[in-house]
C-alpha cells in the first residue's frame, strides 16, 4: 500500500528538534510517557467496550508489553488498547494540541541556558515526542479497536513523517524506538538492558493499573518459551494507607495524571467509608498552569468506579476555584455508565465535592503551619484563584479567609492574614484598611496610603482583579469592616494632638472659597472638592464615594464588555502642601481668577496621575507643565 509523507506542524517540528538534541537530562522518563499513553489507551478501550456492546474489540487480556531486541537495538512499547485510526495518527501524533505549547515554545526561545530550557520541558511534559530523546527513529503500528485496517507511522523526527495503511495489524498500538547508538562510557542509559527497563518501570509506572510485562529474551535451545514477567505491582495508590506508599510513588502518579513533570506541592488523601464509599488522592501542583484563567482549559479530577477508569477532567468533584487540583476519585457505588450530566446533579457527588473541598482547604491550612515556604508557594501560584471562592462559596468562606494572605504596607516581602492583621491593629482602629489597584508598586506609593503610613496604620495592598469583588461580598472579618482607603470619607483624626477640633474648623473656613470655586471649575470631572486628612506629601488625591465602584473595577467590567456609567469622583486637597496653600492664597488675593483655572486643572491631573490614571488631555497637560517649568528656570 502506498506510503504518504507529511510535514509536521511547525510547533511539533520545533518540539522534536528539542527532543532530538535533548536538553532534558533525565532521559529515562521517555518510558514513563509511553507507558502512560498505553495505559490511557487501555482505559479508553475498556470504557468504550462498556458503553458500546457492539464494539468489535477484544478486552479479555488488556495489558502493556515491553520488548527489547538487543541486536537491532530496538525497544517496543505495545498495548492492545483503543488504538488510532489513520486520520487520528496524523492528527494526534503529527500536531500538538496542547494549548500551552505555543506559549511553551515562546518561553523556550527566551530561556537562554540549558537549565532554563530543562525546567520548561518539565513544566509542559511532551509525551510521545520524548521518545526522540533516546531514539533516532520511531515507528508506530496501530489499529483502532473495531476497525479492520491498521496504520504505520514512522519518523526520524526531522520535519516529516510517513503514514501507510496496512491490512494486518494487531488491535492497539505498538511504538518501536530505534535507539541511538550505545554510549560505551555510559552504561546507565542502555535501554536494551532488562534491568534498566525493570528499574524504570518500577520507579515511574508501578501504580499503572494494567500489567506492564517484559517479554523475555528468546529462550535458549530446548527450554520452553519464556513467560513474560509483570514488572509493576498495579496497586491503586489511592486505596492504600499512607504509610504503605512512598512519597515518590505518589509523585509519579501525579505526573501520570497531570502531564506535569515536576513534583506536586502537596498530596491529599481521603478515604470515605460508610454508605457511599470512595477514595480520593488529590494533588496540589507546585506551579499554576498557563491556562488557569482561560475558559475551557482542562480541569477536574479523574473519576474511577471500582478501579475502572470512567472519565478525565471530571469537573463536578471540586468547585471551580479549586480547578488547579489534580487527582483521582474512585467511587464504589456509581454506575459505570454515569455521564457528566448525571454527575452534575447527583446528590452523592455533591456530598463528595463538599468533603473534598474541606479536605483540600484544611491541607492548605496545614501548609501554613509548616516551617518551610510551601504555603508561600501555594499562595503565590493559586491565591488569585482561591479568592474566587470567597465570592462563590459562602459555606467555606471562613475556611478560605483563614488561609488567605495579602501584601501589606508593613513590608515589601511580608504578607499578612486577616487574623494577623486584626491582632496587630492599633488602639482605636476600628476597620481593616485596604487599597486595590493594578500593581503593588502603584498602590504602595499612592497618595491615599500616605497618611496611613505616617500614622503607622497597616494597609492591605490588593492587586488581583477578584479582590475588587470579594471585599464587597465579604464585607467584614471578625466584626471589623473591610474599608477601602480610596473610598468615602476617612477620618484618621488629627495628626498630632496639637491640632484641635477648633483649628480644623477654622481651616475648613479658610479654604471654603477655594474648594467651592474649584468644584465649579472641575465640574466636568469631579463632583466635589474637599480637604483631606489622608495626605501628607502629595498635594491631592482622588477618592470615590463610599458606595461607588473603584476605577479598577470599572475597568474590569469594561474589559468584559459591559457598559459602566462614568462616575464622578471626589478631589481631596492636602491643606499642608505648599501648592495648595499657595493656590488658596492667590485665590483670596485675586479679583480675576481666570489664570488660576489652569492651576486647578493641573492639581486635578496630578491626582489622576498619582493613582495610575491618565489626564483627560495628556498632550495639553504636558504642554502646560513644560511651559511652567521653562518659566521657572
Ligand atoms: P498527551 O499524552 O499528553 O496527550 P502525547 O503526545 O503523548 O500527548 O500523545 C498525543 C495523543 O496521541 C494522545 O492524547 C492520544 O490520543 C494519542 N496516543 C498516544 N499514544 C497512544 C497509544 N498508545 N494508543 C492510543 N492513542 C495514543
Image (cartoon, rainbow, N blue to C red):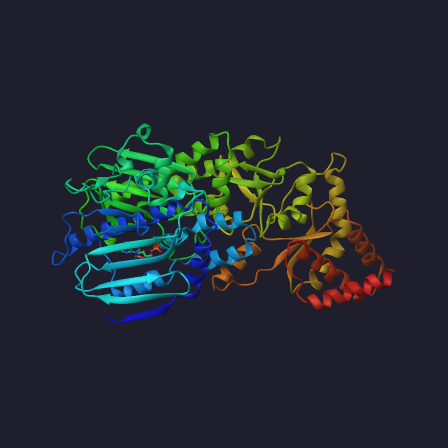
Q: Residue furthest right?
A: 633
Q: In the rendered view of the protein, which quadrant contains the N terminus?
A: bottom left
User: Given the current orientation, which residue lies at the most extreme left position?
Assistant: 54
Closer-to-camera residue (264/422): 264
Residue at 56% in and 63% down: 566
List x then y, in percent, for residue 373. Answer: 51, 35
User: Percent x, y for residue 528?
Assistant: 66, 57
Horizontally, is 318 left or right of 41 in the view? right
Q: Nearer the viewer, residue 288 or 254?
A: 254
Q: Which residue is rendered at x = 74% and y = 34% of the image? A: 497
Horizontal placement of 96 versus 333: left or right?
Answer: right
Quadrant of ligand 1 in image: bottom left
Residue 257 shows in the view = no
Residue 381 is situated, as x and y percent measured from the top left of the image, at 48, 45
| Residue positioned 19% across, 57% down in the render | 170
Residue 111 % position (x, y): 55, 53
Which of 161/323 is in front? 161
Q: Quadrant of residue 276?
A: top left
User: Could you say which quadrant of the image residue 128 lies in?
Assistant: bottom left
Amino acid at each position: 500500500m502506498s506510503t504518504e509523507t507529511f510535514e509536521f506542524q511547525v510547533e511539533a517540528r520545533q518540539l522534536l528538534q528539542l527532543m532530538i538534541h535533548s536538553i532534558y537530562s533525565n532521559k529515562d522518563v521517555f518510558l514513563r510517557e509511553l507507558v502512560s499513553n498505553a495505559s490511557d489507551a487501555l482505559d479508553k478501550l475498556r470504557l468504550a467496550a462498556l458503553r458500546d456492546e457492539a464494539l468489535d474489540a477484544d478486552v479479555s487480556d488488556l495489558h502493556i508489553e515491553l520488548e527489547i531486541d538487543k541486536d537491532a537495538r530496538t525497544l517496543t512499547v505495545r498495548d492492545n488498547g483503543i488504538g488510532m485510526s489513520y486520520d487520528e495518527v496524523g492528527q494526534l501524533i503529527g500536531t500538538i494540541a496542547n494549548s500551552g505549547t505555543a506559549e511553551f515554545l515562546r518561553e523556550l526561545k527566551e530561556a537562554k541556558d540549558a537549565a532554563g530550557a530543562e525546567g520548561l520541558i518539565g513544566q509542559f511534559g511532551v509525551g510521545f515526542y520524548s521518545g526522540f530523546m533516546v531514539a533516532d527513529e520511531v515507528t508506530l503500528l496501530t489499529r483502532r479497536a473495531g476497525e479492520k485496517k491498521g496504520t504505520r507511522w514512522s519518523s526520524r523526527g526531522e520535519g516529516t513523517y510517513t503514514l501507510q495503511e496496512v491490512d494486518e495489524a494487531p488491535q492497539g498500538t505498538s511504538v518501536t524506538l530505534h535507539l541511538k547508538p550505545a554510549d560505551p562510557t555510559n552504561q546507565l542509559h542502555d535501554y536494551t538492558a532488562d534491568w534498566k527497563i525493570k528499574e524504570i518501570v518500577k520507579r515511574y509506572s508501578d501504580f499503572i493499573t494494567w500489567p506492564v510485562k517484559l517479554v523475555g529474551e528468546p529462550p535458549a535451545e530446548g527450554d520452553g518459551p519464556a513467560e513474560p514477567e509483570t514488572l509493576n505491582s498495579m496497586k491503586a495508590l489511592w486505596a492504600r494507607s499512607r504509610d504503605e506508599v512512598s512519597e515518590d510513588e505518589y509523585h509519579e502518579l501525579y505526573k501520570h495524571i497531570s502531564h506535569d513533570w515536576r513534583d506536586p506541592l502537596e498530596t491529599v488523601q481521603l478515604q470515605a467509608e460508610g454508605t457511599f464509599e470512595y477514595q480520593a488522592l488529590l494533588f496540589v501542583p507546585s506551579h499554576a498552569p498557563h491556562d488557569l484563567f482561560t475558559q475551557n482549559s482542562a480541569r477536574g479530577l479523574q473519576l474511577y468506579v471500582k478501579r475502572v477508569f470512567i472519565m478525565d477532567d471530571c469537573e463536578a468533584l471540586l468547585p471551580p476555584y479549586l480547578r488547579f487540583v489534580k487527582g483521582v476519585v474512585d467511587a464504589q457505588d456509581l454506575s459505570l455508565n454515569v455521564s457528566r450530566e448525571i454527575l452534575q446533579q447527583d446528590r452523592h457527588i455533591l456530598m463528595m465535592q463538599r468533603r473534598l473541598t474541606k479536605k483540600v482547604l484544611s491541607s492548605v491550612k496545614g501548609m501554613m503551619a509548616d516551617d518551610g515556604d510551601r504555603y508561600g508557594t501555594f499562595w503565590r501560584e493559586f491565591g488569585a484563584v482561591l479568592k474566587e471562592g470567597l465570592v462563590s462559596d459562602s459555606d467555606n468562606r471562613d475556611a478560605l479567609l483563614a488561609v488567605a494572605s495579602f501584601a501589606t504596607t508593613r513590608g515589601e516581602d511580608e504578607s499578612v492574614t486577616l487574623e494577623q492583621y486584626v491582632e496587630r491593629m492599633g488602639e482605636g482602629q476600628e476597620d481593616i484598611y485596604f487599597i486595590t489597584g493594578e500593581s503593588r508598586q502603584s498602590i504602595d506609593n499612592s497618595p491615599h496610603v500616605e497618611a496611613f503610613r505616617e500614622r503607622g496604620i497597616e494597609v492591605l495592598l490588593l492587586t488581583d482583579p477578584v479582590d475588587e469583588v470579594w471585599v464587597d461580598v465579604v464585607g467584614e472579618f471578625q466584626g471589623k469592616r473591610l474599608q477601602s482607603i480610596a473610598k468615602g470619607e476617612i477620618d484618621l483624626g488629627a495628626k498630632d494632638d496639637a491640632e484641635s477640633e477648633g483649628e480644623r474648623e477654622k481651616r475648613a473656613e479658610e479654604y471654603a472659597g477655594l474648594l467651592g470655586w474649584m468644584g465649579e471649575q472641575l465640574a466636568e470631572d469631579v463632583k466635589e472638592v474637599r480637604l483631606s486628612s489622608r495626605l501628607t506629601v502629595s498635594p491631592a488625591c482622588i477618592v470615590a464615594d463610599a458606595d461607588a465602584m473603584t476605577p479598577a473595577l470599572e475597568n474590569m467590567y469594561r474589559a468584559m464588555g459591559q457598559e459602566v456609567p462614568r462616575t464622578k469622583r471626589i478631589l481631596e486637597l492636602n491643606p499642608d502642601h505648599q501648592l495648595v496653600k499657595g493656590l488658596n492664597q492667590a485665590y483670596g488675593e485675586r479679583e480675576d481668577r481666570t489664570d488660576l483655572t489652569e492651576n486647578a486643572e493641573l492639581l486635578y491631573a496630578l491626582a489622576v496621575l498619582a493613582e495610575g490614571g491618565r489626564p483627560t488631555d495628556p498632550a495639553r497637560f504636558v504642554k502646560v507643565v513644560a511651559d511652567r517649568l521653562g518659566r521657572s528656570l
